[in-house]
Image (cartoon, rainbow, N blue to C red):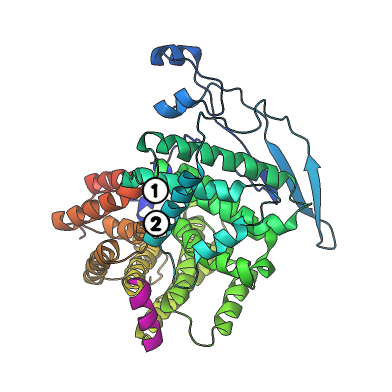
Amino acid sequence: MIGSMRRQSTSVAQLFPKRVSRHAKLISLNRYHFEYKPSVSPLSSHQLHQHNERCSGSVPCSNCVRRRVECTFEQQKPKQIWINQDESGKKVVTRVSAVTCKSQSPRLDLNPTGDQIYYLSHYFETFLRRNSCNTKTDIFTDVIGLMKDQASGTFLHDAVLSLGAMQAVKLNASEGIDPSKTYNLAVHYYSKSVLGLRNALEKFDQEPSARHRILWTTHLLGLFELMTDATGEGWIQHLVHGTSKALVAAGPTSCQSGHGQRFFTEIRIFEVCRAIIFNEPTFLAKADWRCLIREMRAKEQGNADLLDELLDIIVSCSTLRVRAKDLIYYSDADDVNLPKHLDDAFDVAQEGFRLRQSLIDWEAKDQPPKQQTVENASGNFSSLTKAFFAATSIYLSGVFDYEIPYWQDMGIVAPNLSEEEIQMHVINILTHTNSVLYNSSISPLLVLFPLRVAGARSWQGWQQDCIMQNLLVVERTFPVAAAFRADLMGVWARMSPPT
């Protein structure tokens, strides 16, 4: 977060190790380049000897899955596909050859019955009911509809079954499945989905109709990572190098209606949270994507919800933080053009005041009665919206007040908040995130952003205890919350009260 720049030397991003997670497969789309890599570094023979068990040779092997370690299976070169653009702007697809895997699909000693598959689908639906992200989409209906077309493979269905199995693991469920095999089933279908997705990407040019199934699969695999990987690295790989860049490759026109629009509506809040948590740029700040959002809002004829509008402001705040960071930390002091640097600094501050006014104007809007009815029926999204507003207000202040000496030395007035205002927002975040976690079906993932912001400004023990308790609630389903807890404990250990 923004506090990491001076007072908080260890950020969430720094905490995550630079590695691929236990089951993570990298999707890399560099200039529309899709690359799916299978497993990471194999265990050495010495490590295997320490475990007193040999790798069974399947992919991933049943022994290694049961022990939750990586197989000693020989790595293969990734299959890959390039999607470039010629001078006319038309996409041109070039296939790149790859070494095929000795075993074309994962083989665990599992033979799920039709009843088990039914129950795994049921647990997938349970996961969706407990992890709502907006009021406008019905993921289950869309995904089930897309699953019916399996001409390009079963990778989407496999992702659904993997997520359903992992939800059953979290619930310690036994209805319709054997609890002793549920985790193995989850890994089996995850691995199968990854391989199927890789093959689908190789045939991307031949089967453009598979685009939406590919997008949904990357999203579901990312959610699976969040349920299994405490670092969050696997999710970042799927979202940043998979879902987001695949959307960019497809372009905003693919999201103007139908499946594309509903998928974009679902994924947008995850991309917003990623950008602001890690202080990174996002494609959502680009003019063509902002235009898409305006067009979508216009079609709703005044029925756009306040959270949707707030997400636009959050993207602008995240973009401003990137600008401020580049201005302060990446300017060459020996080769700086002082007049231009001063102009750039004034522009950043002016944009900060504009965004502060946007937040004030947003807060002044009355919530339409129709929207309140929808929210009451689908979950307490008004509480999530208020938590996001309070967190964004603090975040915008932090763009400036963590480096306030810089702005003071430049003679620039910054749009930061007083400590009293910040503490008011902290209390609001704690109140509304409690409501989201205990009184709604909203995904616990969505409170990580406001809780992390509140944590950076929580000086009192009761505030810190409340944040830790809420993060533990998130961690029950998504162990990535452990990284946030560890990060905040470091922040608090270094924290000195405000003057």
Question: CB atoms at circles 2 and 1 under 8 Å apart?
Answer: yes
Amino acid type assigned to the residue bearing label 1 in the image: Gln
Q: Is residue 395 left or right of residue 421?
A: right
Task: Check if residue 181 falls in the magenta segment.
Answer: no
Which callout, 2 or 1, points at the residue further toward the start of the chain?
2
Q: Secondary structure at mark 2?
A: helix
Instruction: Residue 167: give its label.
Output: 1
Amino acid type assigned to the residue bearing label 2 in the image: Thr
Q: Quadrant of residue 305?
A: bottom left
Residue in view at x 81 percent, y 62 percent: 89
Residue in view at x 40 percent, y 84 percent: 361
The boundaries of the magenta stretch are 368-380
Query: Main structural element of the magenta stretch: helix, strand or loop?
Result: helix
Q: Is residue 10 in view from this perspective? A: no
Residue wearing tag 2: 126
279 above or below 299?
Answer: above
